Image (tube, rainbow, N blue to C red):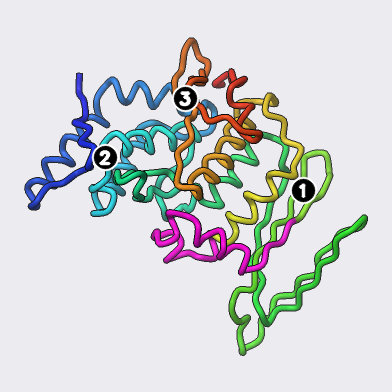
Amino acid sequence: MSSINDNPKGFTPTNKSGVASQFKGLAERFQSTEFIAAIEKTVPSGIGMTSHRIIKSSLAIIQESPELMECTPKSIEMAVRRCAYFGLDPDPALGQTHFIARNIKGVPTCSLMMGYRGMTELAYRCGVVKKMQPIIVHENDVFEYEMGMDPKIIHKPNLSFSGRGKSLGAYVTVVLSNGEKYFDFMLAGEIENIRKESPGKNSAAWGKSPEEMYKKTVIRRVFKHLPITLNANHHAARLKHAVMADEYLDANKEIDLPLEVIDGEFVVNESETPIDENTEFLNKLNVKNG
């Protein structure tokens, strides 16, 4: 049986040969029959994602990141398993998820951060959302929105030679499968305040694609207002878990996810799951994987 030496201080090789050795051990673990079987059981069925794709992409990303290579092997494994649980592609170029390195109580930890495309994909899978479109508002655009009994948005992007100017915020429009419509708007200042409190504020995702992260932030907030029932299907459960896990990430915490599969069902360890008004449903979760 292949295993990982879970050094609490993470990978700490002092030379290139040490890095190669540490990565080799991680790769052997990920390519073991035991680990592949665990990933295959966790990936939701019928979405076209495979354990091979997740493992191959994850290893490529980790190998190219010195920051991730400093994280504990156990945290890297859990980040990959979380990615499999959501059935999303870890390739950062696709914008579904991102592996980030952060410090939790002095321990270098690899965590999975959601991208807006990942959240959108989960929303479509659950069957409640028919269309979702996050959009950035720029200072030279024409933008008006009204709240109240008949809320509406008017947005005319400035396509002139002078350009659209800096980002003022982001909004998302949502059309549900029953025809109902929702939208939410957040100012850049609101989003930046959330970013400042996030351990991933200096991650590659924020550094290279800040507007993508603006979109994810407003999508995450609108999900709280949508009538998505947890017990509708296992995709709905995964969507709620994704939103919750992302909020815990901003608080520099990890949330337990139902990564254990018993007889085709996900089982939550109630003794380890955090309890508050937003996470109480996790203790009642027993979601079919299919």
Give the spatial CA distance, label 2 vs label 3: 20 Å
Please determine whether, in this image, residue 86 is positioned above or below residue 39.
below
Q: Residues within 10 Å of mark 1 (few under 14, many from 20)?
A: some
Q: Nearer the viewer, mark 2 or mark 1?
A: 2
| Residue 276 or residue 185, whichever sits in front | 276
Q: Residues within 10 Å of mark 2 (few under 14, many from 20)?
A: many
In the image, what residue type sits under mark 3? Glu
* Mark earlier in primary sequence (3, 1): 1
Question: For this view, does 190 lie left or right of residue 103?
Answer: right
Can you give x and y, in whole percent of width and height, for residue 119 in the image?
A: 58, 45
| Residue 52 or residue 10, whichever sits in front | 10
Q: Which mark is residue 72?
A: 2
Range of the magenta residues? 184-212
| Residue 260 or residue 120, whichever sits in front | 260
Residue at 29% x, 43% y: name it: 107
Q: Nearer the viewer, mark 3 or mark 1?
A: 3
Residue at 67% x, 28% y: name it: 230
Can you give x and y, in whole percent of width and height, for residue 21 in the image?
A: 11, 41
Q: Which residue is mark 1?
A: 175
Give the spatial CA distance, label 2 vs label 1: 41 Å
Q: Nearer the viewer, mark 2 or mark 3?
A: 3
Q: Which mark is residue 205?
A: none
Q: Which mark is residue 272?
A: 3
- Quadrant location, the C terminus: top right
Q: Is residue 238 magenta?
A: no
* Mark earlier in primary sequence (2, 1): 2
Q: Is residue 185 magenta?
A: yes
Give the spatial CA distance, label 3 vs label 1: 36 Å
SS assignment at label 1 = strand
Can you give x and y, in whole percent of width and height, for residue 14 in the image?
A: 9, 51
In the image, what residue type sits under mark 2? Thr
